[in-house]
Amino acid sequence: MPRTPRRLAGAAALALTAALALTACGSSGARPGSANAVVSKEANSSPYQGTPLTAHFDKPDLTLTDTGGQPYSLRQQTAGHTTLLFFGYTSCPDVCPTTMGDIGVAMQKLPAEDQKKIDVVFVSTDPQRDTPKVLRTWLDSFDKDFVGLTGSLDQVKAAAKSLGILVEDPVVNKDGSVTSSHGAQVLAFLPSDDRAHVLYLSNTSQDVFAHDLPLLAKGVAA
Amino acid sequence: MAGAKRFSRFALAGAGLAAALTATATAIVVASGGDSHAAARLSVADPYIPLPAGADQMAAGYLTVTNAGRGADRLVRVSSPGASSVTMHRSTESSMESVDGLEVPAEGALTLTRGGTHLMIMGWKQPPAVGDQLELDLTFEKAGTIAVQVPVKPLTYRPGS
């Protein structure tokens, strides 16, 4: 069952539409948890509080530089591991630190052996300013084991696009601040097939992550 | 004659009613135009700044402005004696946009919260630490400036947690 490019594109569009619809619910005042519950019929039968995906994206074929300055192949180095993937930038004041902080708080509630089963990967959308050192300092505030990747913006854009995530060029504002893109969602890849099975909008509550991380660590099907 | 009297009495009553309505309408206009506190009665609750994660000390500020008054107001400027830049932003689907002002609805609230509308704070005069307080001067179109002492909280803090 080889996947044609057309089918992949269609799947990405579907997932993006779901994400947009969810965000629309969130901005009208509904809590993310309850919004997630109504997005799809599958959600009702899923053990996860995050949104089960019907399009199971492959991990993007992405090799960038990690915070130790070494090449890091996302596919090879997270193979067979539950992986949480988020795109963002460190000078982002609101969504990025909130999202990574919520994951960090939930991770710290897990037993150490479960923590080791989950790779949390943050891919920079502002590689020019997010050097390995800048990324490491920022990520250490959340969790010293979080992986940070930086490198070619074109590669990052292509990888994000394959997951239905739009990454645009950073804009340097008059006051010197930088506005870049962040994903609207965190994607969870399961160890069974290294594909994305659960989506978390970036305003998902800590409680939802705390509920789902033990399931993700065990690789429970969505 | 009798008919004419009756008519004039009716007309007078009508004129009196109109005068009363005018007086009431005038009173409302005076209240909202003359005394800003009667129009928008603002108070600020739950202000906090999560400790910035990065070396650039890019920070966000969150708070709720409650308006108990019958007139709307608008937050038009925020500044701080302890930071060189405080701007208003709204997070969007995949980025954020700066905004010129934020409405404080009558008998409602303006809520600045994680993942939504927030203040962006840059250029700290002293590196922030948990427990510090930063003064934010919130300037409203009608109510003037309200100074708030905003505590720096742990990175993952949320009100009520």
Image (spheres, rainbow, N blue to C red):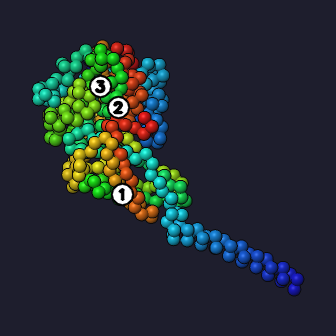
User: Mark 2 or mark 3, which is nearer to you?
Assistant: 2
Observer-side mark, 1 or 2, equals: 1
Check if mark 1's residue and mark 2's residue have beta carbons within 8 Å.
Answer: no
Q: Secondary structure under badge 3?
A: strand
Q: Disc 2 residue type?
A: Asp
Considering the numbered disc 1 on the image, is that residue within a helix, a strand or a loop?
A: strand
Q: In this view of the protein, can residue B126 be seen by the observer?
A: yes
**Residue A2: percent from left, percent from top:** 26, 17
**Residue at image location 48% in from the left, 52% down from the top:** B66
Q: Chain of mark 3?
A: A
* Mark found first going from the N terminus, 2 or 3: 3
Q: On the image, which quarter does residue A134 sit in?
A: top left
Q: CA distance from mark 1 to mark 2?
A: 29 Å
Q: Can you identify the residue that label 2 sits on? A: A102
Quadrant for the N terminus of chain A in the image: top left
Q: Mark 3 highlights which residue?
A: A84
Residue B137 numbered mark, or none: 1
- Amino acid type of the residue that numbered disc 1 sits on in the rendered structure: Asp
> Alpha-carbon distance for marks 1 and 3?
39 Å
Near mark 2 (Cα within 10 A), the count class, few <14, some 14-19 or many ≥20, is many
**Dot 2 falls on which chain?**
A
| Position of the C terminus of chain A by quadrant | top left
